[in-house]
Image (tube, rainbow, N blue to C red):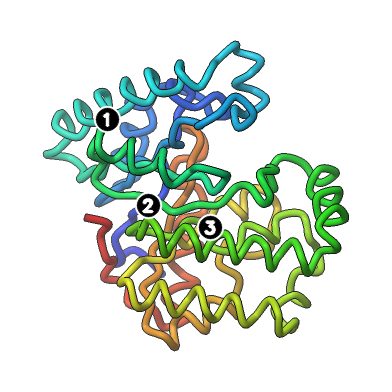
Amino acid sequence: MTESIARVSIHGAHSGEFCAHATDRLEAVIQRYIELGFQWAGITEHMPPVEERFVYPEEKEMGLTPEDHWKRFSAYIQEARRLQKHYADRITLYVGMETEGYSHAEAAIHRAISLFHPDYLVGSIHHVADSQIDGDALSYWRLAERLGGIDSLYARYFDRQYELIFNVSPKVVGHFDLIRIFDPDYPARWKVPAIWDRVERNLRLIRDRGMILDFNARALFKGAIEPYVSAPVLCRALELGIPAVPGDDSHGVTTAGMNVDKAIDILKRSGFDTRWKTPN
């Protein structure tokens, strides 16, 4: 049972107020965390895109430009700081930013840090070769074909992840193996030396930099059989002494806290320290 272990989310609280593929107001999501008895939660809205081509399709439909995103992100920071203070006696909130990994992302990340001073970063990769990997299966497999096959897609993903981790040093690494999202045979990828060697390299850098793995439960909501990170990678992270902390990656009130108890149970049974490391 998980009753004695604190409910937390190191990566969550996207809201329709500031994210086009989420729902509800940010305050309503925070209120839901409080209702569920969360001890603390990280709010991690996406960074503003650096160019028009990196604006997500649903955002283009809304007519949002990169300039609009910078204004909206500023509004997000202001509201998150307000909520952080307003609910301080009921929940500890960490105001964060989730990164992207496309061209010129690092420069934009450093600009956002200097402008907005988030409490922490979630280092996430959603693009390989400047193409989105988590939009739909057809685009995913077309990208794999363009890059020379699924193994090459994985290798390019973990190379880009390494660059981001090395150059930015985020406190948290988000959904470490998101690259498996549309690959039903992903367990076989961990047996490919060119892929596993990159996983090992990245995990060692995460350990050396003192970072935290986001044990991302949203994979279960999307129909996966296990969270990001998958079992073999999670086992290696444990061997290396890397902390893993649950993240719901919530995108509205209905998914706030979803599957966090399952994630906690997996981490507890796997032998991870459930005195959760915070992202501050």
- Residue found at x 71% / y 40%: 135
Compared with 99, 175 (above or below) is below
Amino acid type, mark 1: Ala
Left or right placement of residue 136 versus residue 118 in this view: right
Q: Helix, strand or loop at disc 2?
A: strand
Name the kind of residue labelled 3 in the image: His
Q: Which mark is residue 11?
A: none
Q: Amino acid at mark 2?
A: Ser
Q: For the image shown, how many numbered marks are present on the structure?
A: 3
Left or right: residue 275 versus residue 107 is: left
Mark 2 or 1: the one toward you: 1
* 10 on left or right of 256: left
Q: Which residue is mark 3?
A: 175
The residue beneath circle 1 is 80
Q: Sequence order check: which comes first, mark 3 or mark 1?
A: 1
Residue 108, compared with residue 56, is above or below; it is below
Distance from disc 3 to disc 1, alpha carbons, whole Å, reads 22 Å
Identify the mark at residue 9; answer none if there is no mark.
Answer: 2
CB atoms at circles 3 and 1 under 8 Å apart? no
Q: Secondary structure at mark 1?
A: helix
Spatial distance from mark 2 to mark 1, Cα to Cα?
15 Å
- Residue 26, compared with residue 143, is above or below; it is above
Q: Position of residue 44 (x, y in %)?
A: 39, 41
Q: Nearer the viewer, residue 248 or 143?
A: 143
Residue 194, x across and y down, in percent? 70, 80
The residue that appears at 42% across and 85% down in the rendered structure is 240
In the rendered image, which quarter contains the C terminus?
bottom left
Please rate how many residues cluster around mark 3, counting C-alpha atoms within 10 Å: few if below 14, some from 14 to 19, many from 20: many
